[in-house]
Image: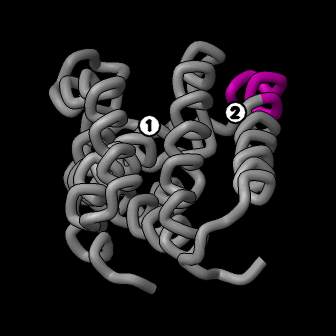
Amino acid sequence: MRLTNKPMNTSQQVKIIFWLFVIITIVELINLFTGRMLNQLGNIPRYIPGLKGIILGPFIHGSLQHYFSNIIPICIFSYLLLQYGLKRYVLVSLWVVLGTGILVWLFGRASSHIGVSGVIYGYFGYLVLAGFLSGKVKLMLISVLVAFFYGGLIWGVLPSSPYVSWESHLFGFLTGLAAAKLWATKTN
């Protein structure tokens, strides 16, 4: 599959989402059956060995509830982001994962930050803003629907629980908005 912003057919989009689902689920099962040993691979701010968590942290979840609360939104938002094309999906994903991870590593609380929710918030930020910036009716409709159905996510950028990485949510959302500003109006 070539990296292009041309529309993909539904079966190609479903295949990508299926493999994303499989990878996150396999990591969750390994983590579950090893007594959550993978949690030590999270993003640990200002701790050099914690840098690996920038890439690995999004694939690791602290509990089955954490996994289930993330797997459906990441699949839905991935599908919606794929409406911009595979190239944009990969570009935004890399930007959000790396940007969020680095910002959490620099400014987050001293804790192991794990879970794909930072990426979900990044996709949320991108999807809400990018459609309006694109000027395309289909993409603007996606922005409106995401804002309407998932607008409550915005409260997750505020500190709420000591066990929730609101920093990942905040920095994910901000990197998603930045990605929309950078790339939403570009055609390729």
| Residue nearest the observer in this picture, 78 or 44 | 78
| Residue nearest the observer in this picture, 10 or 167 | 10
Callout 1, which amino acid?
Ser
* Residue 157 sits inside the magenta stretch: no
| Residue situated furthest front in the rendering | 137
* Residue for badge 1: 117
SS state under label 1: helix
- Judge from the rendering whether residue 76 lies leftward or rightward of residue 92; answer left or right: right
Location of the C terminus (image quadrant): bottom left
Q: Position of residue 83 (x, y in %)?
A: 53, 58
Segment colored magenta? 29-36
Q: Number of numbered discs present? A: 2
Location of the N terminus (image quadrant): bottom right
- Callout 2 crowding tier (Cα within 10 Å): few <14, some 14–19, many ≥20: few
Q: Which mark is residue 37?
A: 2
Residue name at image x 68 percent, y 27 percent:
36
State whether residue 26 appears in this view: yes
Residues at badges 1 and 2 in contact (C-beta under 8 Å)? no
Residue name at image x 60 percent, y 68 percent:
7
Position of residue 58 relative to residue 36, above or below, is: below
- Judge from the rendering whether residue 159 lies leftward or rightward of residue 39; answer left or right: left
| Residue nearest the observer in this picture, 94 or 182 | 182
SS state under label 2: helix
- Judge from the rendering whether residue 75 lies leftward or rightward of residue 122; answer left or right: right
Residue name at image x 33 percent, y 32 percent:
165
Main secondary-structure element of the magenta-colored stretch: helix
- Judge from the rendering whether residue 170 lies leftward or rightward of residue 141; answer left or right: left
